[in-house]
Image (cartoon, rainbow, N blue to C red):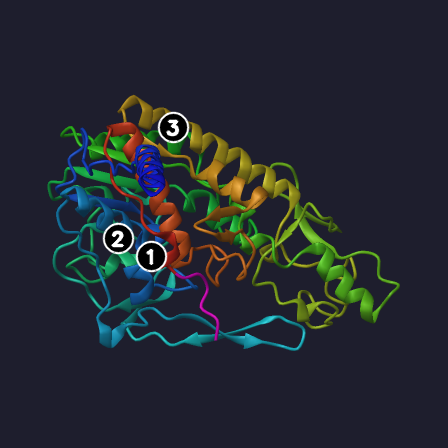
Amino acid sequence: MKNFKNYLYILAASVLFAACKPVITTPTATSGSANFTRYIAVGNSLTAGYADGGLYLAGQLNSYPSIIAQQMQIVGAGSFTQPLFSPSQASGTGYQKLTGFDASGNPQLTAVAATAVRGTITLPGLGTIPLFTKYTGALENYGVPGIKLNDIDNPAYGNGNPYYERLLPGNSPTNTTQYLDFITAQPFTFFTNWLGNNDALAYATSGGAGDVLTDVGTFSSKYTTLISRLTANGQKGACATIPDVTTIPYFNTVTYAAILAGVQKSIPSIQNIYILAADPIGTNYAYRPATASDLFVLTFPTSLIGSTTAGVGTYPYGLDPRNPIESKYVLDANEIALVRSHVASFNNTIKSVASSKGLAVFDAFTFLSNIKANGYLINGLSLNSNYISGGIFSLDGVHLTPRGYAIVANQFITAINNQYGSNIPLANVSAYNGVMFP
């Protein structure tokens, strides 16, 4: 009898345990009110999968649109074709590879040669530019490195941008196809759009010396035109805002404090590093001592400091006000304010126009700013915006690693799911690598 009672107790406990066992329900994958039959991606280098200072096959395969498309196919989306370089030309336009670190811990990068150059052409005002192996065939990823929103209606743009020229049937300098017409030539049902970054980024990465910020009125007009064309037949889509370009590793790795400390190791008496800085409206430049509010570009060759042949020569470069560090190496405080003002206006336009069409919005500005401030923890991975070690940004300090692109893809997917009631599964960020170490 005692054994029988014990049996009853065990049975009761088993029933109680079974009753308390959690039930895991996997939501049914669905497209909601969106139609993903033919998804196209509109944008620039980020959309194309550019990484490590170049466009190459491995980067293309891990572009955020490719990752989004793979996840969309789970809910019945169609195929997604990219303008991939062939395996025999896998290094594409060439890129940078991490090959080690020097005794001071500085990364050593090696250039991987381009394999997809078919020739060059010299154009008035542009100089000599490369021509890449032509791509022919189906196309859903329309990412063009270097393109600005300001360029979408320029009929000659397909001659001076070799990434766009590669996609067109004609040869430079005979192309006359506007990007806006090119992306809408074939029917599509859904789109993502991340144009507009270069309208601020190109100015910023040139230190304000090699490009101009797109006029805010022009940006508003052209963005409205772009979205009107993309939604002309009732298509749905998702747009992304423009990040604060001053938060990327390109501007936060070679710092003023590090440069000054390096100089003072050799010359303790040095108190100032001199730069050529802009006035508040960015038109006139004069020398002044640098501060922590000025951002040096990742590519600044610090070995030039103190040289009497760099810059204007004669006087120690950067250490004498008569030979300040050139503007192309520094995004100074006034230039930063101009960039931020334009980006804020651009993002107001993006949100307003997208809202007027009922489109999803991925707020890349807020998302990437939060990563810069707080880091990002996902699947047990602790990531941040630091150069190389952060895991999100590639070796050029501007574009993303495969892991970074997977994170962006998931943010787009989340925005799409929230807007259209779809249930596209998120990509597994852990399955994508950060910077590849030797």
Q: Is residue 193 above or below residue 434?
A: above
Q: List x then y, in percent, for residue 90.
A: 28, 72
Specify few, some or many for label 1: CA neighbours under 10 Å numbering under 14, 14-19, or 20 or more.
Answer: many
The residue at which mark 3 appears reads as 351
Residue 49 tag number: 1
* Residue 298 appears anywhere in the view: yes
Distance of label 3 from label 1 (alpha carbons): 24 Å
Q: Is residue 417 above or below residue 395?
A: above
Residue type marked 2 = Ser
Residue 66 tag number: 2
Distance of label 2 from label 3 (alpha carbons): 24 Å
Q: Which residues are magenta?
A: 433-438
Distance of label 1 from label 2 (alpha carbons): 9 Å
Residue at point 35%, 60% (across, down)? 124
* Residue 282 appears anywhere in the view: no
Q: Is disc 3 placed on a helix, strand or loop?
A: helix
Is 83 displayed left or right of 323 in the figure? left
Whichever of labels 3 and 1 marks the residue nearer the N terminus, that label is 1
Residue at point 84%, 62% (across, down)? 270
Q: Is disc 2 placed on a helix, strand or loop?
A: helix
Residue type marked 1 = Gly
Say which of 357 and 405 sits in front. Answer: 405
Say which of 20 and 391 sits in front. Answer: 20
Residue type marked 3 = Lys
Image quadrant assignment for residue 417: top left
Residue at point 12%, 47% (across, down)? 78
